[in-house]
């Protein structure tokens, strides 16, 4: 591997390197992801060339905003660059970019007609070599996607992981007084744009999870009076997943989308069940405890869940068919809302200890615990970006205030609030869109 | 492993009819505070108002606990006596949790609290067939603020007579 530059090589990762995410690459230019502290990589992104310069500028700004939000890049002020508009036809004048101390350079163009077309080249000015050269097309109704796809190409070529910008977040939009909060299901792009509401808010609704192909969801609603699990295609009508349970809630998809695991409360005990989309249920845990918040491993073979069978809520892993549950969390306080990372290496969770709420990660055997975010306010419900590097959760300061969405990376850096219109909770991050 | 359906068929029948009423009642009572014992006029004997004011419609729990305190048991003894006297009512138990816990666990905790109260009332002679329960978790707090005194008011099971 060749370090990208004399001063900008990124070293990312967790202490000890045991959770290192380095992926060897053929590219000359790359970010070394091995562990320890790092400095974000400066990157130059002139406005995209376009017959509509305002459109070219808008697309370039979406790309800059994405890369900046990732915490791994520092897009340079476009006004400070040797040229203001990208050129994808010709090789850059490497000497002038090096003189401006720019090592990573993105040149793009974009046009919209029947389709939106974009070309992008990523250059290593030190090596005078192209890292990426690609062209993309999207539907003009959804032109922001082209910027997200380009952002993923840049992120992927320079940081060694897959991107996560061409994704959406399913969440609960909240409004009204706290004692009678109205909750609507909603979905938006990962950067907060293009919000669409999926339900009216007539019934109390929470805990939506997006399907593995990004085109379906499960959630819990009080439509029937008691909490029950519902399944729906995006834009389709919802159906109650199972019949006859006093209360069902906390649904989550299997990785193939064909099975849903969830909790059933009956007479004060809460056990985990799974059901096919046709609604045929199977009981997976059995006892007087509270077993809830199931999450499948990405290979579908295991389920991590929370249980207070040992006296307080802790994390357990069992086979996806039930049985043989092993406790994996042993720290002070309580653990809940576990969720497998998409790469299967880590579990994110909510921990309560010392009067605080923490969002943390651990390996699937419970070792390597790392707290990413701590707050006196309630914060809970982590969800993973599809590249297993970023986590979103929600925080609620209590009182008459309401929840908002927050993001943090798995190194505990770059925590920020994702702005939404009104209160927002229960995020569920989609896979990369196909 | 076994099938889910047979276990629950018994419990379904009464639930659906009364739930709409319960939600409406909760919404009305929600923001108004506890309202037990401080309203002038106890209501006519056998009225829902009398139950609310003179008997007390709710019991409170310690943090993350579903054990009945001596105070809670005393309230439930009064509830059971009243419910046994006026047996024309159906009874919905609503379990609630405070906000200092995660959403899904709190749904289960509210269900457990409601079940504990149901079992206690049955042990005091209330006919099980009159009782149904549901949980709101932390979704419907009655006290809105951000300190311990508030949270303790929200850790409750409310007996709604219908």
Image: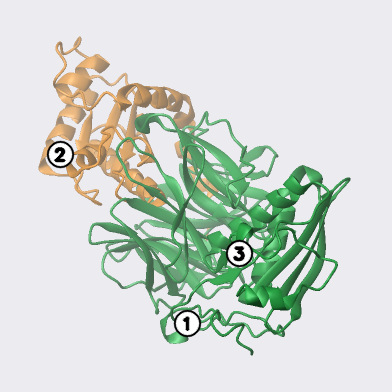
Chain colours: A green, B orange
Q: Chain of mark 3?
A: A
Q: Residue at x 18, y 24 (%)?
A: B36
Q: Nearer the viewer, residue A13 or B133?
A: A13
Above/below status of B159 relative to A283: above
Q: Dot 1 lies on which element?
A: loop
The local crowd at label 1, few if under 14, some if 14 to 19, many if 20 or more residues have their Cα within 10 Å, is: many
Above/below status of A324 relative to B126: below
Disc 3 vs disc 1: Cβ atoms closer than 8 Å? Answer: no
Q: Report whether residue A5 is seen.
A: yes
Q: Chain of mark 2?
A: B
Task: Determine which residue is flagged by label 3.
Answer: A386
Q: Report whether residue B124 is seen.
A: no
Say whether mark 1 and mark 2 are on the same chain. Answer: no
Residue closest to the far bottom: A1
Quadrant holding the C terminus of chain B = top left
Q: Which mark is residue B133?
A: none
Q: Residue at x 51, y 54 (%)?
A: A262
Q: Which quarter of the figure has residue A368?
A: bottom left
Q: Which quarter of the figure has residue A350?
A: bottom left
The local crowd at label 3, few if under 14, some if 14 to 19, many if 20 or more residues have their Cα within 10 Å, is: many
Q: Position of residue A134 (x, y in %)?
A: 81, 68
Above/below status of B21 relative to A231: above
Disc 3 vs disc 2: Cβ atoms closer than 8 Å? Answer: no
Closer to the camera: disc 3 or disc 2? 3
Number of callouts: 3
Task: Determine which residue is flagged by label 1.
Answer: A35
Q: CA distance from mark 2 to mark 1?
A: 57 Å
Task: Determine which residue is flagged by label 2.
Answer: B73
């Amino acid at each position: 591997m060749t370090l990208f530059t004399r001063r900008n090589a990124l070293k990312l990762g967790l202490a000890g390197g045991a959770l290192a995410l380095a992926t060897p690459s053929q590219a000359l230019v790359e970010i070394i992801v091995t562990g320890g502290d790092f400095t974000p990589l400066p990157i130059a992104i002139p406005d995209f060339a376009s017959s509509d310069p305002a459109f070219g500028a808008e697309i370039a700004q979406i790309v800059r905003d994405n890369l900046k939000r990732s915490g791994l890049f520092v897009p340079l002020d476009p006004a400070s660059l040797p040229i203001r508009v990208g050129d994808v036809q010709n090789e850059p004048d490497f000497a002038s970019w090096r003189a401006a101390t720019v090592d990573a350079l993105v040149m793009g163009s974009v046009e919209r007609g029947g389709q939106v077309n974009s070309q992008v080249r990523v250059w290593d000015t030190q090596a005078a070599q192209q890292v990426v050269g690609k062209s993309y097309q999207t539907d003009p109704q959804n032109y922001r996607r082209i910027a997200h796809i380009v952002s993923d190409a840049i992120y992927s070529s320079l940081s060694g992981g897959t991107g996560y910008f061409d994704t959406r977040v399913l969440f609960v939009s909240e409004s009204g007084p706290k004692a009678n909060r109205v909750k609507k299901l909603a979905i938006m792009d990962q950067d907060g744009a293009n919000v669409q509401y999926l339900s009216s808010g007539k019934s109390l609704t929470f805990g939506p999870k997006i399907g593995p192909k990004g085109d379906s969801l499960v959630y819990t609603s009080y439509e029937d009076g008691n909490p029950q699990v519902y399944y729906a295609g995006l834009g389709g009508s919802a159906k109650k997943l199972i019949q006859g349970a006093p209360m069902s809630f906390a649904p989550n998809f299997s990785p193939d989308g064909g099975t849903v695991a969830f909790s059933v409360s009956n007479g004060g005990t809460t056990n985990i069940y799974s059901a096919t989309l046709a609604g045929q249920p199977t009981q997976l845990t059995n006892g007087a405890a509270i077993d809830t918040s199931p999450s499948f491993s990405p290979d579908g073979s295991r389920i991590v869940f929370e249980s207070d069978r040992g006296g307080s809520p802790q994390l357990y892993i069992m086979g996806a068919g039930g049985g043989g549950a092993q406790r994996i969390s042993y720290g002070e306080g309580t653990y809940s809302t576990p969720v497998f990372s998409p790469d299967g290496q880590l579990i994110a969770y909510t921990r309560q200890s010392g009067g605080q709420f923490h969002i943390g990660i651990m390996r699937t055997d419970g070792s390597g615990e790392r707290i990413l975010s701590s707050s006196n306010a309630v914060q809970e419900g982590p969800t993973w970006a599809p590249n297993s590097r970023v986590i979103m959760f929600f925080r609620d300061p209590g009182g008459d205030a309401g929840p908002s969405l927050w993001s943090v990376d798995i190194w505990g850096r770059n925590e920020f609030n994702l702005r939404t219109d009104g209160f927002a909770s229960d995020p569920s991050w989609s896979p990369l869109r196909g | 492993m076994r099938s889910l359906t047979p276990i629950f068929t018994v419990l379904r029948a009464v639930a659906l009819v009364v739930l709409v009423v319960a939600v409406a009642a909760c919404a009305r009572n929600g923001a108004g505070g506890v309202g037990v014992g401080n309203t002038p006029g106890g209501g006519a004997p056998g009225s829902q108002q009398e139950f609310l004011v003179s008997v007390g419609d709710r019991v409170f729990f310690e943090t993350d606990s579903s054990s009945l305190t001596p105070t809670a048991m005393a309230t439930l003894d009064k509830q059971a006596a009243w419910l046994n006297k006026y047996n024309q009512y159906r009874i919905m138990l609503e379990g609630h949790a405070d906000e200092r816990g995660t959403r899904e666990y709190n749904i289960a905790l509210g269900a457990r609290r409601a079940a504990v109260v149901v079992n206690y009332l049955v042990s005091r002679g209330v006919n099980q067939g009159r009782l149904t329960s549901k949980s709101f978790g932390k979704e419907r707090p009655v006290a809105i603020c951000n300190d311990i005194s508030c949270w303790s008011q929200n850790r409750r099971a409310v007996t709604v007579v219908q």
